[in-house]
Amino acid sequence: MIVVDLAAALVCFAGACHPALVGIATPRGEFEVRHEATKLPGYGGDVLTFSETRAARFAIHRTWRGREKLYEAPAGNRVVTNGCINLQPAVYDLLVACCAGEKVVIR
């Protein structure tokens, strides 16, 4: 199971927690995670989609280049996305390897 703590800006899985970039529009709740390919530039070829509405698709994905320094900010200053959960590329790769297809709990 993947747990995202929005207030702490952390994603936890496989017994460890990692800093994340989150958004005020990130939906809370329990969701199935779907590993999907994408051709959109900047995402590295894949994302972990967890929620969709008529107006938006929410996913866990790699951080776009140039935003890496934001992980050094305090948790409250890492609320910077439009609702997706952004992870450092190495952390995203670990998450995909262990947990793609599992549930994510966002609180």
Image (tube, rainbow, N blue to C red):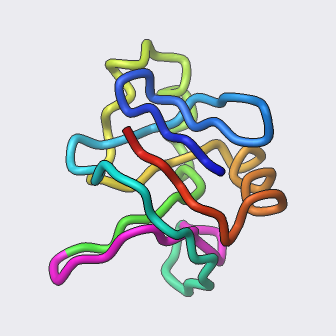
Please determine whether, in this image, residue 37 is positioned above or below residue 94: below
Total marks drawn? 0
**Residue at image point 78% right, 32% down:** 15
Please determine whether, in this image, residue 33 is positioned above or below residue 81: below
Residue extending farthest to the left is: 55
Query: In this image, 36 relative to 22: left or right?
Result: right
Residue closest to the eye, 88 or 35: 35
Q: Position of residue 25 (x, y in %)?
A: 21, 50
* Quarter of the rendering containing residue 80: top left
In which quadrant is the C terminus drawn?
top left
* Quarter of the rendering containing residue 58: bottom left
Query: In this image, 53 relative to 85: left or right?
Result: left
User: Which span of residues is magenta-colored?
Assistant: 43-55
Residue 31 is one of the magenta-drawn residues: no
Please determine whether, in this image, residue 6 is positioned above or below residue 8: below
Residue extending farthest to the top is: 74
**Residue at image point 65% right, 30% down:** 18
Q: Position of residue 36 (x, y in %)?
A: 60, 82
* Quarter of the rendering containing residue 37: bottom right
Residue closest to the eye, 13 or 67: 13
**Residue at image point 65% right, 69% down:** 44
**Residue at image point 34% right, 21% down:** 77
Q: Position of residue 14 (x, y in %)?
A: 79, 41
Please determine whether, in this image, residue 105 is positioned above or below residue 78: below
